[in-house]
Structure formats: structure tokens, C-alpha cells
Image (cartoon, rainbow, N blue to C red):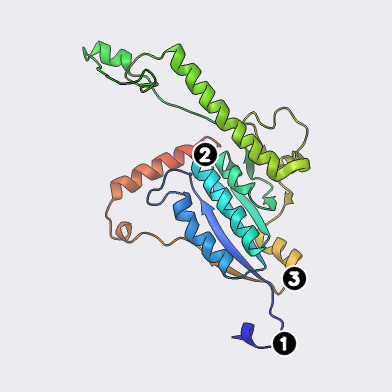
């Protein structure tokens, strides 16, 4: 009730939002704009002096990363609230895209940041099908309708088309980082090659503003009396009762594979 007593100065408040996991299309348990939106909206509406983002993500969908980042910027500007991103294990690829939406980025001495690039992976099973005597039949209306079918041989046209699409996504990612980090970025030709940096190395490249942790950094900026209010996603009801276990297990395997690319498990 103290906040509503006239002429009594209240201590600064920081709203803390945790953004963790691989970024993918909206699905239960995954990090997406749909899952992040309610947390971010509530955090900014709580009238804080600052919003702190706890980020731990190996990346994922470029569209969902862009949507989350755009939402952070819109809310920050509407409410005139500064945003601080605190990187834990990793903020790579789409995870760094989200971090770049903050006004300041802080990392642990062992945090991994960067991987400013775009990746597409798949498999080819056409040889296996041939050996089994299975014929793949695909019919399309439009010569570009089918691309990189894993059950058909890869073609030069498909690869060239994919390279063009990946290049466009990469340029969008680069533009986002340059727009947000500006003159802070080092003049390093490897900065946008998908390379990653750790802790102080990321600071030296301009990908982060310093090595710091959330509570002490916020106390340094806003004073020792600063208070924190956390906004975290609630666990879905069904998994608590053991339902949809198989889907949850698959999601966890995929997410572990994403983190494993950075030596994390």
C-alpha cells in the first residue's frame, strides 16, 4: 500500500522477465511471441523503473525472434522504460536477436553470444528408398512448389533458391543488430559470419555492454533499495498430470540438440 501514500517516495522497481529455450513456432512449452507476449505485456504495464530480461536461448525461428524483439521495443517506447538484457548460458542466433532489442546487454564471464547467421538443415533419404524399391511420387502445379524434398535427389536449382532465401534472412538479421548496437560494434569482418564469443570477448566485439549479473547490476544503477518483481510462464496444466508426455519428451530432445551445438546440455 505504500506506493499509494502521497508524498512518500517509493523505491525503484525492476520487472524481471525470463525468456528461455529454443525459439520456434507457437507450441506448448516453446519460446515464441505468443508465449512471451503475456509476460512482456504484464511486466511493462506494472509501471517499473526498468525491465530486465533473463535470456538463455540458442536461437530458432527468425520470425518469432523478430516478433519478440519488435514487441520489446514497442513496449519499451510506449512506456518509456529502459530494458536490460542479462545473458545466462547462451544468447545465440535468434536468442541474440532478442537480446539486441534491449537498450543494454550484460553477460556472465562464461556466457556465449553471437552466432549472427542463418542455418537450414535436413536429410536425404532417396538412396535408401531406391534400395528398398520404393518410388517417390510428387505432383505440383507450379515449378517452384516443391523444394528440397528429402526423398528426392537434391538439385542445383533448389540449393541456389535456398541460398537466396537464407541470404535475405541473414541480411535482415545483420540490419537488426546494426540498428540496435550501432557504433558499439567492433570493425570485425567475422562479426556476422555466425561466429560466437564468450563473456568479455563479446563485450570487446560490442555485442554486450559489460560482464555483470542482474541483481548487483540493477542495484548499482537503481540503488540498494531497488525491488524486483518476476513475470514467469506458468507450467501447462496437462503435463502436470502426466499427459502429452511423448510430445514433451520430443520437444526436450530437440531443445537439448539446439543447446548441444554450443557445448551445453
Q: Would you name the residue on which mark 2 appears?
A: 62
Q: Tell me the residue at 71%/46% (across/down).
A: 208
Which residue corresponds to the image point at 69% horizontal and 32% vertical from the top-left?
191
Pick whichever, 246 or 93, lies toward us.
93
Q: CA distance from mark 1 to mark 3?
A: 20 Å
Q: Residue at x 56, y 68 (%)?
A: 45
Horizontally, residue 29 falls left or right of residue 65, namely left
What x and y, as percent, mark residue 84?
66, 56
Identify the mark at residue 161; answer none if there is no mark: none
Q: Residues within 10 Å of mark 2 (few under 14, many from 20)?
A: many
* Residue 200 seen in this snapshot: no
- Mark 1 vs mark 3: in front: 1
Residue at the spot of label 1: 7
Instruction: Report how far apart the C-alphas of labels 1 and 2 lie in the structure.
Output: 47 Å
Q: Dot 1: within a 10 Å radius of its alpha carbon, few (fewer than 14), some, or many (20 or more) residues?
A: few
- Image mark for residue 223: 3
Amino acid at each position: 500500500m505504500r506506493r499509494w501514500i502521497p508524498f512518500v517516495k517509493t523505491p525503484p522497481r525492476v520487472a524481471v522477465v525470463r525468456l528461455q529455450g529454443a525459439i520456434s513456432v507457437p507450441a506448448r512449452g516453446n519460446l515464441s511471441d505468443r508465449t512471451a507476449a503475456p509476460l512482456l505485456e504484464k511486466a511493462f504495464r506494472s509501471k517499473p523503473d526498468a525491465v530486465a530480461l533473463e535470456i538463455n536461448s540458442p536461437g530458432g525461428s527468425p520470425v518469432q525472434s523478430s516478433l519478440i524483439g519488435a514487441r520489446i521495443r514497442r513496449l519499451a517506447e510506449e512506456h518509456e522504460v529502459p530494458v536490460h538484457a542479462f545473458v545466462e548460458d547462451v544468447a545465440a542466433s535468434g536468442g541474440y536477436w532478442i537480446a539486441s532489442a534491449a537498450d543494454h546487454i550484460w553477460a556472465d564471464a562464461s556466457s556465449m553470444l553471437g552466432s549472427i547467421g542463418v542455418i537450414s538443415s535436413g536429410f536425404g533419404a532417396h538412396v535408401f528408398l531406391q534400395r528398398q524399391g520404393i518410388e517417390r511420387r510428387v505432383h505440383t502445379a507450379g515449378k517452384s512448389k516443391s523444394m528440397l524434398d528429402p526423398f528426392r535427389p537434391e538439385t542445383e536449382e533448389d540449393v541456389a533458391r535456398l541460398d537466396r532465401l537464407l541470404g535475405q534472412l541473414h541480411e535482415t538479421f545483420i540490419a537488426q543488430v546494426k540498428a540496435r548496437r550501432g557504433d558499439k560494434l567492433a570493425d570485425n569482418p567475422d562479426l556476422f559470419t555466425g561466429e560466437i564469443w564468450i563473456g568479455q570477448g563479446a563485450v570487446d566485439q560490442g555485442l554486450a555492454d559489460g560482464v555483470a549479473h542482474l541483481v548487483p547490476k540493477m542495484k548499482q544503477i537503481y540503488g540498494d533499495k531497488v525491488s524486483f518483481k518476476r513475470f514467469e510462464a506458468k507450467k501447462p496444466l496437462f503435463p502436470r498430470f502426466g499427459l502429452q508426455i511423448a510430445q514433451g519428451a520430443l520437444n526436450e530432445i530437440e531443445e537439448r540438440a539446439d543447446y548441444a551445438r554450443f557445448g551445453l546440455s
